Amino acid sequence: HVLQAFTDKLNSIARPMRQTLTYDRGKEMAEHVQLTKNTGMKVYFCDPHSPWQRGSNENTNGLLRQYFPKGTDLSGYTQEQLDAVADQLNGRPRMTLGWRKPIDVYAQHLA
């Protein structure tokens, strides 16, 4: 189930924007070889206890905690609800992007 969900979501991203995925060592990536075959994305893993190796992921986790406290069981949410949170975060200006919205930067890279 997790492999298919990752595959579907990653394949919905434009190919130029999905080259690699850096992940922690969670069990949900146990089928990373198949994920690479399904998506064409290389999967890399961080060293244990090294969050700085995941770049903006740690910042994004902090933003997500505003919607879902740590330990929240996401299975109680629909995909539409999760997508709505993603849309809100992607429409929120970021200092690291010169106060541009991630969705605008994404669209600019695709253009």
Image (tube, rainbow, N blue to C red):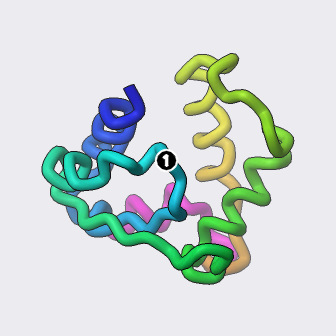
Q: Say if residue 12 shows up in the picture.
A: yes
Q: Residue at x 56, y 32 (%)?
A: 83
Residue 31 appears at what percent x and percent y?
31, 46
Left or right, 55 with reference to 15 = right
Q: Say if residue 111 shows up in the picture.
A: no
Say what amino acid the circle numbered 1 marks: Lys
Image quadrant assignment for residue 53: bottom right
Q: Residues within 10 Å of mark 1 (few under 14, many from 20)?
A: few
**Residue 100 is one of the magenta-drawn residues:** yes
Q: Residue at x 61, y 66 (%)?
A: 57
Residue 91 appears at what percent x and percent y?
63, 51
Most prominent secondary structure in the magenta stretch?
A: helix
Q: Residue at x 25, y 48 (%)?
A: 35
- Could you say which is closer to the camera, residue 75 or residue 93? 75
- Could you say which is closer to the camera, residue 107 or residue 47? 47
Residue wearing tag 1:
27
Q: Residue at x 67, y 75 (%)?
A: 49
Which segment did they paint magenta? 99-111
Q: Is residue 14 above or below residue 51?
A: above
Which image quarter holds the C terminus? bottom left
Image quadrant assignment for residue 69: top right
Left or right, 94 with reference to 28 = right
Q: Is residue 95 above or below residue 102?
A: below
**Residue 57 is one of the magenta-drawn residues:** no
Q: Is residue 65 above or below residue 74?
A: below
Left or right, 27 with reference to 82 = left
